[in-house]
Image (cartoon, coloured by chain):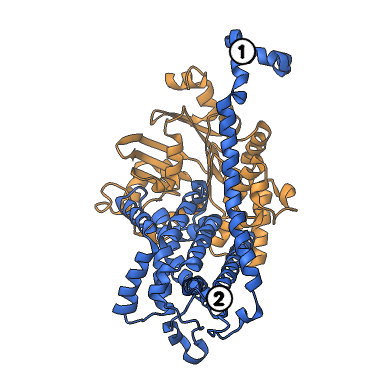
Amino acid sequence: MPVEKTRPVSFACVEERDPQLDRDAVFEANDSLAAAKMAVRSLDLYYKDFHALHDVTLEFPEKQVTALIGPSGCGKSTLLKTLNRMNDLVEGCRVEGDVLLDGADAYRTLDPCVLRRRVGMVFQQPNPFPMSVYDNVAYGPRTHGVKRRAELDEIVEESLRRAAIWDELKDRLKKSALGLSGGQQQRLCIARALAVNPEVLLMDEATSALDPISTAKIEELVGEIKRDYTVIMVTHNMLQALRVSDKTAFFLLGDMVEAGPTEELFTTPKDQRTADYVEGRFG
Amino acid sequence: MTWYVSNPATLRKVTLGPASDDSGRFEAPAHTTSALALRGLVYVAAFVVMMAFLLIMGYVLANGLPALTPDLFAWEYTSANVSLMPALVNTLLMAFLSLLLAVPIGVGAAIYLVEYAKRGSRFVALVRMTAETLQGIPSIIYGLFGLLFFVSMLHWGLSLLSGACTLAIMVLPIVMRTSEEALLAVPDSYRQGSFGLGAGRLRTVLRCVLPSALPGITGGVILSLGRCVGEVAALIFTAGSIAAIPDFAGQGIFALFDSARTLAVHMYVLASEGFHIQEAYATALVLLVLVALLNAGASALTKRLRKDN
């Protein structure tokens, strides 16, 4: 990806700071941030003049599901897109602070393509490519250089099995993915994301466009895949956060108000605003 | 509740409730005179369009078919047989060469504008405006430019190459604009999906965006093909009117510098000389069939390309 490589990282003071020193500083300052699978530290994000995220520090523990909740426009999706640099594609977006993957600076030490392979994403609207089911799942591996047919076959089957959709689709691998139902399309997109063997999976309101049965299937699936992957999901549905996630972070107007184990956050919130939100008084 | 809504009798009462005192008003429009007149007019308009097509087809068929003799398809043109065969081959050569030049440049420019340039930048707006202006220029002006630039200045003479370059410039904006529209119509969610899997921009464009935009791009190519095949004014000035196939077998690549009369030019010459009006109609018929075949071929090709993806 020549364009992304040459594009200067949109960090403040990028020239003055030595990434290695910076990382050491992070290790010293906060061991738990560096030890988490993924973390953000003092993250500020701007869309042109709009200050969308204010000084967010949050860690995402390995092989757990972290849910980001909050009313619309609170910045939770923005934070999610920052984690795999999808915000790079947004004109006028500027990020300050650190995004850490396995304790390493994800913005300054990793190529965006590598970062996005390691941190996969499932979108709000199912977005299968207009190709066959097989080619959809094989798109990622092919992008990263897998050419042998046997190997691809194996990856496709494995990924579809992990997304619990192999039995439904094994006879229609050659059919267009656009002919599937919405729920099947979304699980196909999950399979497609898993096919590049990511370490973290980001889910941006991945069930909000689906019917209750498909939603239940995907929630069940998330419970399965967290054994192998770190999952970070944005959801509008508080019951979903409660059902699926181990850790929850509550956002309001660009601030992270509170984060903690899901049970705790819902039963004994420390902040009044969190209490109001989870009890449904606003949002 | 549902019963009221689903019962047509009450449904009407419910929907017309507020205006029940003059409810006739709601049913009337379909029968007022102005509505009837309008409906009549659109029928007439549709009929006129169909008749225009049928008249032209019928006229060309009636005049061209009787003149369609085997002589007309002789490989060598003589003033006696006025064969259209060399012109037919030249037409295909000319169209192929023009598109060979125009399609990569046009599609490439469109990819740059949509996928690489900053969206809404001034440069993009400028290129778009330039293309729109180019599209509005009459073809005779392209011919004049070709004559001055390719024929005289570059000393390419009245030749296949001069003609093809002129046509390429002429159809470039069509290819670019239609490709641009086709690329813009590809949902951003495809691009995001591809980027999200760690694909680079080039791969995203080639593997994900371009295949989806292919039908639209082919539409532009078909349009350009039509312009190339039907063009007269620009070619008289740049490709000349020698009714022979350039001698590629003997001269190799230098045959590109031979003059070449296309079917449309052939038709124009026959008609303006006035001796072979019937043969001109026959040529028109062949031209129509050729365009129809080329379009059908291009559509079939797109379908196959899409299936493979």
What residue occupies the far top of the structure in this picture?
B21
Check disc 1 and give the amino acid type: Ser
Q: Could you say which is closer to the camera, residue B189 or residue B303? A: B303
Q: Chain of mark 2?
A: B
- Circle 1 crowding by C-alpha within 10 Å: few under 14, some 14–19, many from 20: some
Mark 1 to mark 2 CA distance (whole Å) = 66 Å
Check disc 2 and give the amino acid type: Leu
Which residue position holds label 2?
Answer: B88
**Judging from the image, what secondary structure is the residue with disc 2 in?**
helix
Q: Could you say which is closer to the camera, residue A268 or residue B57? A: B57
**Judging from the image, what secondary structure is the residue with disc 1 in?**
loop
In the rendered structure, the colour chosen for chain A is: orange
Which residue position holds label 1?
Answer: B23
Quadrant of the frame with the C terminus of chain B = bottom right
Residue at x 30% of width, y 50% of height: B122
In the rendered structure, the colour chosen for chain B is: blue
Q: Could you say which is closer to the camera, residue B139 or residue B276? A: B276
Q: Is residue A262 above or below residue B208?
A: above
